[in-house]
Amino acid sequence: MRNILLKGWRPALVLLFLFIIWEMVVKLAEIPAWLLPPPTEIIEEAMTGWSLFSVHLQSTIQLSLLGFVIGSSIGLITAIILHLIPIIRESIYPLLILSQNIPIIVLAPLLVIWFGFGLMPKLIVITLVCFFPITVAALDGFRQTPNELKHYMMMAGANRGQLFWKLELPYSLPAVFSGLKISATYSVMGAVISEWLGAKNGVGVYMTLASSSFRTDRVFVAILFIMIVSLILFAIILLIERILVRWKAKEENKK
């Protein structure tokens, strides 16, 4: 984690450079603020309008975390079932791939018709975007377990359950955490999309109101905090991974 923090100044420096160019181009070209506001105005709006925006941000964070937990749990359980029961994997796995080809923005109105404007359709949207990366990553992790280790445990008398829980599952943790990091960022995006279905609070609602009133600075404030929340979730999962999968971190440090 310390190495990541030490290397973080490079992307931060690039981002600062891009903001400076953005500011200069907007000022020199005299681009109207409603079309493309400069970074200074976006930061000013974030500070002055924080009391209003914070309510929406809190709602989105809560929805993202709840949907992420549900989607991650379903994704991991699905991967375990598909791995342990090959017949189900051969029958269901192609359907899981097809489910990801359905545009969420098209499916969303149907969810409202079926489940109303409550919490259920929003959680379904987030679950749909979260569970698949974890399922695929976990299945790949299970398959990457070295065969020699499997043979050794089988020679020692391990049954199928012991082989999975004591070897395949621990060995797949790096892959599972890779899926979790992807799903964590998707969960925020899924929460914002789900709030477009109809909600009282949320960043999605805030963006819709800002767009309809041509408050482009507020739209960029929402985008900025969506990225910040996604990065924070990513960093938290990365930290947990470093703690739980220490043997993997030691291998990377040796390299």
Image (tube, grey):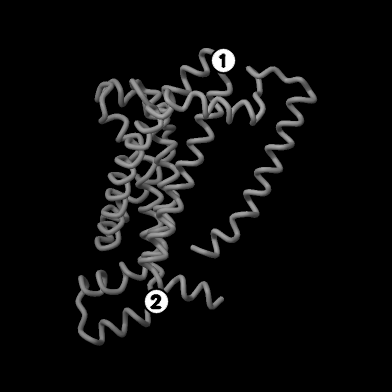
Q: As shown in the figure, which amino acid type bears the numbered disc 2?
A: Pro
Q: Quadrant of the C terminus?
A: bottom right
Residue count near mark 2 (Cα–Cα under 10 Å), binned few <14, some 14–19, many ≥20: few
Instruction: Count the labels in the image.
Output: 2
**Secondary structure at numbered mark 2:** loop
Q: In terms of depth relative to the viewer, which is nearer, 134 or 107?
A: 134
Residue 157 visible in the displayed image = yes
Q: Is residue 35 left or right of residue 237?
A: right
Q: Is residue 33 left or right of residue 180?
A: right
Q: Position of residue 233 (x, y in %)?
A: 42, 48
Q: Quadrant of residue 216?
A: top right
Check disc 2 and report the residue beneath it. Answer: 146
**Secondary structure at numbered mark 1:** loop
Residue sitting at the far front: 48
Q: Is residue 148 above or below residue 105?
A: below
Q: Quadrant of residue 127?
A: top left
Q: Is residue 168 left or right of residue 211?
A: left
Q: Position of residue 86 (x, y in %)?
A: 28, 61
Nearer to us of marks 2 and 1 is: 1
Residue sitting at the far right: 28
Q: As shown in the figure, which amino acid type bears the numbered disc 1?
A: Phe
Label 2 with label 1: CB-CB less than 8 Å: no
Q: In terms of depth relative to the viewer, which is nearer, 175 or 87?
A: 175
- Residue at image position (71%, 43%) is 17
Check disc 1 and report the residue beneath it. Answer: 214
- Residue at image position (65%, 24%) is 37
Q: CA distance from mark 2 to mark 1?
A: 57 Å
Q: Position of residue 223 (x, y in %)?
A: 52, 32
Q: Is residue 150 left or right of residue 33?
A: left
- Residue at image position (51%, 24%) is 48
Residue count near mark 1 (Cα–Cα under 10 Å), binned few <14, some 14–19, many ≥20: some
Q: Position of residue 160 (x, y in %)?
A: 22, 72
